[in-house]
Image: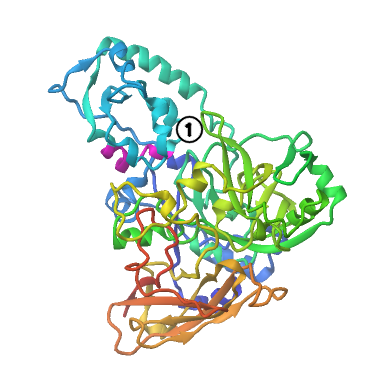
Amino acid sequence: MSKFLLQKETRKLTFISRFYSSQSHNNNIFIYKEEESYKKKKNLNIYDFIVSTLIGTGVILLTSERKKAFAFDGNKQNFDYNPPERDDLPSYKIDEIKKHNKNAERIWVTFKYGVYDITDFVENHPGGDKILLAAGMSIEPFWAIYAQHKTAAVLEILESHRIGNVDKNDLKILNEKNKKTSQNDPYIKDPQRHPALIVNSMKPFNAETPPSLLVDNFITPNELFFVRNHMPVPEIDEKKHLLTIEGESIKKPISLKVEDLKKKYKKVSITSVIQCAGNRRADMNKYEKVQGLMWEGTAISNAKWSGVRLRDLLLDLSIDPNDKTIKHVHFEGADTDPTGTPYGASIPFKKAMSEECIIAYSMNDEPIPPDHGYPLRAIVPGNVGARQVKWLKKIVLSKEESPSHWQQKDYRAFSPSVKIGDQPNFQSVPAIQEYPIQSAICVPAPGTKISKEDREFDVCGYAWSGGGKGIIRVEISIDGGKNWQSAELEQDPEQTVDEMYAWTLWKTTITIPEDSKDTLTIICKATDRQYNTQPETASGIWNVRGLLHNAWHRVEINLKK
């Protein structure tokens, strides 16, 4: 794919991709790079080397005005935020604040020197009743874990519930407690990450792949694979790690070491996509405001996963594939929240018994990296990433879905009639499993300048559909959808359109119309094996959590004379 893009390098297309470096992010410095031709040494050839050298990796530091143009201010973290001075509000002693705990009629919390009555917000809290953990206390120790709260948007909501100030003398006590929290940062042992990743939040770490690098490789390099974490990355010793299997129809639970999986069961491999259910949420947010991390369009990656079939493990325990008492299979990870509750999810028993579901211990022929689930990860091809639990430690067969918060009160797409501030009925819609058809343009990037004298330019991106439904075509339009041209497809030769879990990379060349103006909007849409295609807009699929956004992807570029 990279060779295709570089064959016509004389066109001098400028591909811009945004990223935060781990160091600069903490200082709110936004860095933009010209395209890096990132390759592993074993994949480099002399052609790529020469072109990479010519392109270079010049760094552009943006002014504050340009920062505003490109950044989602509501998502910025680790900035210096202090509540406004409110001398018009009363002061409260800590003993009085403590009385307003989870059992009180009115529930209070503190943040720095502000006091907040959150009673009326509890029911609307996206994290459910976890907010009550901080009732009568400071929320800062809890935000050390759930640091995604430290955004301008969330703090604006909090400030709307301000009722007073913490007594200045008592404030010293709170400051000492918060210093201890900072010294015991639960994220201090998180792994190092590749500086090219586009960081959406540092704690927990969530980042996507630069678009121009995403299409360089059919198999995404481990270090460039997008990262979705909900909590700190757990430290695990593979030799001591155990996978427990228990539940319905299992007479005696068993615990297996990673080495047991490698020695006792047949090793299988599958190339499969993992995509966050919130991928392209930023696009949906442009249509109407939504809640959640503002993923752009590259919270998706493709890897070769190796391990053992989940089916083989269950058959070895004498589980009948037709057992009607088993409806769901739960997965529990080793990552935990402040209460010790692990991340959890579940999939239907029928899916768990399919040939493609595996318990992986290898990613791209290497041990799974810490950010991606070392040493074991549940791989559920065709399903959203939220069901593919990392750091897997327990499998439970059950009549019911997982009781986990992430299964019951997250990753559910509501009707467009449910708005921000409404109390959603989580039982009114099922938990998301398979992802609908998706495609996006990765190159050129929005705002790219292309000379009309070039007469044509290259466009490329990815397409994928959940449930193993292969992509049969990707089409591109530059006139608002009146006319379309088909793109060339690159697919896994070992998979068919009837069972395709890897993505499709696509490419085409666009001819610049002679009567074109100063801008040109490129549109892409895909069609899968079941003839599902993407909707034109977000109108009918908009949902308050910004999930499963798959409307036509649009990129506007600039044309110069």
What residue appears at the point 83 percent right and 51 percent down from the top-left corner? 316
Residue 269 visible at all: yes
Along the line of sight, the residue nearer the viewer: 54 or 317: 317
Quadrant containing the C terminus is bottom left
What residue appears at the point 65 percent right and 42 percent down from the top-left corner? 391
Q: What amino acid is found at the position of numbered circle 1 in the picture?
A: Ile
The residue segment tinted magenta is 148-157
Image location (x, y in percent) of residue 11: 46, 78
Image location (x, y in percent) of residue 426: 42, 49
In this rendering, is residue 532 above or below 334? below
| Direction top: furthest residue | 169
What residue appears at the point 38 percent right and 69 percent down from the top-left corner? 448
Which residue is labeled 1 in the image? 145
In this rendering, is residue 102 above or below 317? above
| Direction right: furthest residue | 263
> In the image, 264: left or right of 551?
right
| Direction left: furthest residue | 88
- Location of residue 464 (image quadrant): bottom right
Q: Residues within 10 Å of mark 1 (few under 14, many from 20)?
A: many
Residue 417 within the magenta-colored segment of the rendering: no
Residue 153 within the magenta-colored segment of the rendering: yes
- Mark 1 element type: loop
Residue 363 visible at all: no
What residue appears at the point 31 percent right and 20 percent down from the top-left corner? 100
